[in-house]
Amino acid sequence: MSTSVLSLRLPDDLKDRLDRLSAQTGRPASFHVRQALTERLDHLEDMYALAARAEAARSGQATTFSLAEVAHDLGITLGPVSDDVLEDLH
C-alpha cells in the first residue's frame, strides 16, 4: 500500500488526547489518526451525499415519489394513516 503525507493542525486538547492514547497503546499518533479516518470517512461521505440529495429534492432538481406512488408500484395497499403519524412526517 502506498502512502502519502498529510500535515494538519490540531487544537491543543485534541493533540494531548492523541498523545495520551499513543502513550497508553504504544502505537504512534499516525496509527490512531489513520484508524479514526478509516472508521469515520465512510460516514462523512454518506452524510454529505445525503445532504446533497436532500437539497436536490427540496429544490426540485431530483425526481421524488410519494408514499402512495411507491406503494402502488410495489403492489402494497396502504391502510388508513392517523393524523399523528402524518404530523410526525413533517
Image (tube, rainbow, N blue to C red):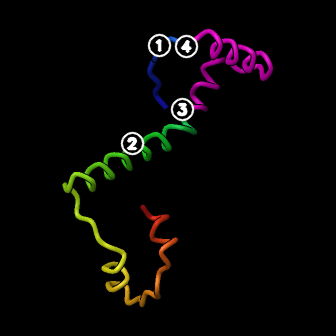
79 versus 54 height, above or below: below
Contact, CB < 8 Å: mark 3 with mark 4?
Answer: no
Say which label, 3 or 2, has the lower sequence index. 3
Label 2 or label 1, whichever lies nearer to me, is 2
Residue at 31 percent of width and 46 percent of height: 52
Tell me which segment is drawn in magenta: 10-37
User: In the orientation shown, which residue stands out farthest toward the front?
Assistant: 83
Separation (CA) of disc 2 from disc 1: 23 Å
Residue 18 in the image, given as x and y percentages of width and height = 67, 18
Label 4 or label 1, whichever lies nearer to me, is 4
Residue at 42 percent of width and 42 percent of height: 45
Say which label, 2 or 1, has the lower sequence index. 1
Q: Residues within 10 Å of mark 4 (few under 14, many from 20)?
A: few
Contact, CB < 8 Å: mark 2 with mark 1?
Answer: no
Say which label, 1 or 3, has the lower sequence index. 1
12 versus 5 height, above or below: above
Q: Residues within 10 Å of mark 3 (few under 14, many from 20)?
A: few
Separation (CA) of disc 3 from disc 2: 16 Å
- Please give the label number shown on residue 7: 1
Report which residue position mark 4 lands on: 10
Which quarter of the figure has residue 62?
Answer: bottom left
Q: Amino acid at mark 1?
A: Ser
Say which label, 4 or 2, has the lower sequence index. 4
Q: Amino acid at mark 3?
A: Leu
